[in-house]
Amino acid sequence: MNKQPENAGPPDALTRLRGVGPQLESRLKNLGIHAPRDLLFHLPLRYEDRTRLTPIGVLQPGSRALFEGEIEHSAIVRGRRASLVVVVSDGTGRITLRFFHFRAHQKQQLSRGVRIRCFGDVRAGYQGLESVHPSYQRLKPGRDLPVADRLTPVYPTTEGLGQNTWINLTDQALQQMKDGSLELEELLPGAMTKNMRLPSLGEAIDYIHRPPPSADTEALINRNHPAQHRLAMEELLAHNVSMQRLHRAQRALDAHPMSKQAAHEAGFLKQLGFELTGAQKRVIAEIAHDLVQSHPMQRLLHGDVGSGKTVVAALAALKVCANGHQVAIVAPTELLAEQHLRVFTQWFEPLGIEPVWLSSKVTGKTRAAALEAINSGAGIVIGTHALMQEGVSFSKLGLVIVDEQHRFGVHQRLALVDKSRDRQMQAHQLIMTATPIPRTLAMTAYAGLEVSVIDELPSGRKPVKTVAVSNERRSEVVRRVAAACSEGSQCYWVCTLIEESDAIQAQAAEAVASELASQLNNIEVALVHGRMKAAQKQDVMARFQGGGIQLLVATTVIEVGVDVPNASLMIIENAERLGLAQLHQLRGRVGRGSKRSSCVLLYNPPLGELARQRLDILRRTSDGFKIAEKDLELRGPGEVLGTRQTGMMQFRVADLARDAHLLRSIPPVADSLLRHHPEQVDKLIQRWIGDAARYVAA
Ligand code: ADP
Ligand code: MG
């Protein structure tokens, strides 16, 4: 061969595409894109409607729009930070463009007299309309530029990879698909696409990347187009089968049947001081039934905040201990794990079982002793994710209890199950979550797990009266705290700061604590936040529990698990910035005793539309399931499950709120694929979950 092609490599090498060199190739690979085929599945995140020019005079604040005009004025304004400010007018009105990041040449480009076309968010500024960092294009003098004739796709991307690159790359991949050099296998069963009248895979992909001018733009923008349904179906199916396969594989392993009755059970129930609810009894029976099987239990326990999951977990633990096996209990935060430690110690010490504690803050000799105890068979081990880390080894792990599962990824949970030296036998698993998961979401996220629900709160609980109060009336709220404390109640004052470091949160909470302490004489005020030492935190919590502290100022570290029945008033600062699920969790800290409880959502006006809706929902209902459904609607599933960080449920096209109606048709198809077409299942998982599914195969 004497002719060396410019871009060598296998036929499906990315470098064969125009514009792709080794550098871009490696960046793409980091995004999970290894071949042109993968580009087809790198789908637009959303669309922009650049098909219409809006006269500046009728631009609406809060909209995203395409507009053009002549630059009247442009200057670099020096403030705390220099910014480039450009005023554009088209005769109907004037708008100010602001660039906080800009290069020197941009100042020259955007000089007086130049005509530009912009696309961006429009907002109301101090001096009329503004747009911050719009995208823009300079117009040639005297020449009109046509507007786009179709929706413009916007691709998910990372820094330094512009939209033009994505358009160029997907253009080429789509071309290959159309001329047949790139083949796409249909993986959905024909019966399904036919019944649901879904387009073919190729049609759907082409449509979504490059909607034709005649496309139903509204449906596309709302992700409600059959082409999107087609892909969403496939993606949801892929997630479903991947989770099912994982759980089925687990279930096929052997586990020790815990068939010995726990001798202490009756005594344990007696000293609780309350009757179990019907729902608790039912769930306890379901778990007991699983535990005597010779395959590992994999059960998800849902129950709203305060429904009493802990005692259910304790009974399962008791049984496993009675059978001579170990129990590991993991919680996502130190504070919640400590709460479990306190409760379990109180319950189990009288029975001669002393729980062992492990968190990342346990170091040195104490750590060595804990590891040794775990290694030599301690009955109950409680801790944070530190339990999942290296160096922890159980001799005979029989049950793993994970609280607030959604904070952990599946692989993390399974890593813990793997920590037993008893290699032949798998531990049983009980997964507890207080975030009520809408059924639709559960069908996908937890496909293949058995589900138990505690759908009844202990009797005597009174709903928490919730009000939203503007921060302008803060002093009234402080007086209310004073009144409640003088009547013998205890209060939480929760300081919330989003996206700030622990340190800044702690600082803010300290400031609020001293502000309140100076305004509230005769009231014992204390502070708890994530930067405090475990012992310090524990001490404060114990004093609050004992009634020695009346007002506890806290960061959101108290979000989960803290249980002080005498606390009957909670103030949540900056409530407008929190999501529904988090507000519901926080509020669940009150209303646990016999007193009427209230929650004050303190907000900074003016309230945005979404925030107003959120606070409204909380005022109207305390039903966790209703709140979760709403949350899903307002925010999307990744947030509801809190998996943003773990990356467990990231969908490319599917949207669990909008596609809820599709979910119903998934389980039967998933079953049939798993049973009859395992090779299709592999391909589906590879296509939609790809690298992220590695743990599934493990
Ligand atoms: P969660 O489900 O949020 O984890 P917990 O297990 O912490 O709830 O229980 C909340 C509180 O309710 C605890 O103080 C617990 O002792 C109490 N509790 C649990 N079950 C009952 C019951 N059946 N009757 C009365 N109180 C109960
Ligand atoms: Mg709990």
Image (cartoon, rainbow, N blue to C red):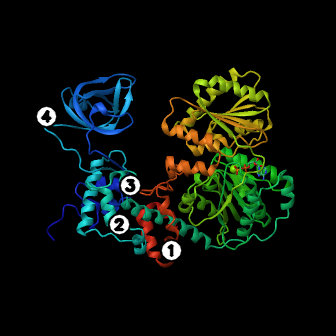
Measuring from the top left, give residue 423's x and y in whole percent: 64, 70
Measuring from the top left, give residue 113's x and y in whole percent: 18, 27
Spatial CA distance of label 2 from label 1 is 23 Å
The residue at which mark 4 appears reads as 141
The residue at which mark 2 appears reads as 199
The residue at which mark 1 appears reads as 674
Task: Name the element at disc 4.
Answer: loop
Measuring from the top left, give residue 171's x and y in whole percent: 25, 57
Spatial CA distance of label 4 from label 1 is 63 Å
Spatial CA distance of label 2 from label 3 is 28 Å
Q: Is residue 332 above or below residue 615?
A: below
First in residue order: circle 2 vs circle 3: 3
Q: In the drawing, does residue 407 fall left or right of residue 547?
A: left
Spatial CA distance of label 4 from label 2 is 45 Å
Q: Quadrant of residue 80?
A: top left
First in residue order: circle 4 vs circle 1: 4
Q: At label 3, which amino acid type do we have?
A: Leu
Task: Name the element at disc 1.
Answer: helix
Residue drawn at (39%, 64%) of the image: 230
Q: Nearer the viewer, mark 4 or mark 1?
A: 4
Task: Name the element at disc 3.
Answer: loop
Can residue 395 be seen here? The reply is no
Q: Nearer the viewer, mark 2 or mark 3?
A: 2
The residue at which mark 3 appears reads as 31
First in residue order: circle 3 vs circle 4: 3
